Amino acid sequence: MWIMVAGPYRAGSADAATRAANLAVLNAAALAVWEKGHVPVIGVNMALPMIAAAGEAHYDALMAPVSLALAERCDAVLRIGGASGGADREVELIAAKGGKVFRDSTDIPQA
């Protein structure tokens, strides 16, 4: 399965250290998905290089649209962490098309 890892990145904080810590948590969860034999997908990891190229002023125009476009192609989602409107939208999109929603990486079956 292609499994989106959804969780907070910038939610509630514009602090660079918090964003870096949140991204580290997303990437660690992605590794757990990979170790189960699936392909992890993180919208933030796809959008951030484009935002860097376009400039921070384009954050809102790129982050959610890129993440949601990726979510449309995923079979499932692993929702981690705390409050995040973007992560919740990814979960809703994947669930609405019949995709599986996992709340813990231990719930993901081995491929």
Image (spheres, rainbow, N blue to C red):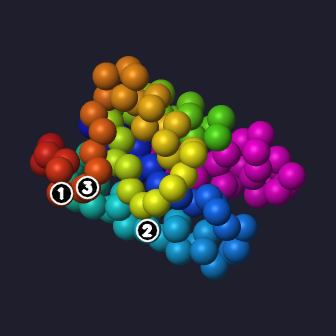
Q: Nearer the viewer, residue 15 or 40?
A: 15
Range covered by the magenta-colored residues: 40-63
Task: Tell me which residue sits at (38%, 56%) in the image.
Answer: 80
Q: Which residue is mark 3?
A: 104
Q: Is residue 2 above or below residue 27?
A: above
Judging by the rendered image, the residue that carries numbered circle 2 is 25
Element type where label 3 sits in the image:
loop
- Name the residue at the bottom extreme: 17
Rendered residue at 24%/56% (across/down):
105
Mark 2 Cα-neighbour bin, 10 Å: few <14, some 14–19, many ≥20? some
Tell us which disc is closer to us: 2 or 3: 3
Majority secondary structure in the magenta region: helix
Question: Which tag, 2 or 1, sits closer to the chain's start?
Answer: 2
| Residue type at numbered disc 3 | Asp
Residue 33 visible in the current orientation: yes
| Residue 109 appears left or right of 16 | left
Task: Report the residue at 51% width, 56% height from top.
Answer: 83
Disc 3 versus disc 1: distance between alpha carbons?
A: 5 Å
User: Along the horizontal axis of the image, is 88 left or right of 63?
Assistant: left
Q: Is 19 in front, or is 82? A: 82
Residue 30 x %, y %? 36, 57
Q: Is residue 5 left or right of residue 61?
A: left
- Amino acid on which the number 1 mark rests in the picture: Thr
> Among all residues in the image, which is located at the extreme left?
110
Tell me the SS state at disc 2: helix
Q: Amino acid at mark 2?
A: Val
Q: Residues within 10 Å of mark 3 (few under 14, many from 20)?
A: few
Distance between mark 2 and mark 3 Cα atoms? 13 Å
Q: Can the viewer see residue 39 in this picture?
A: no
Residue named by callout 1: 106
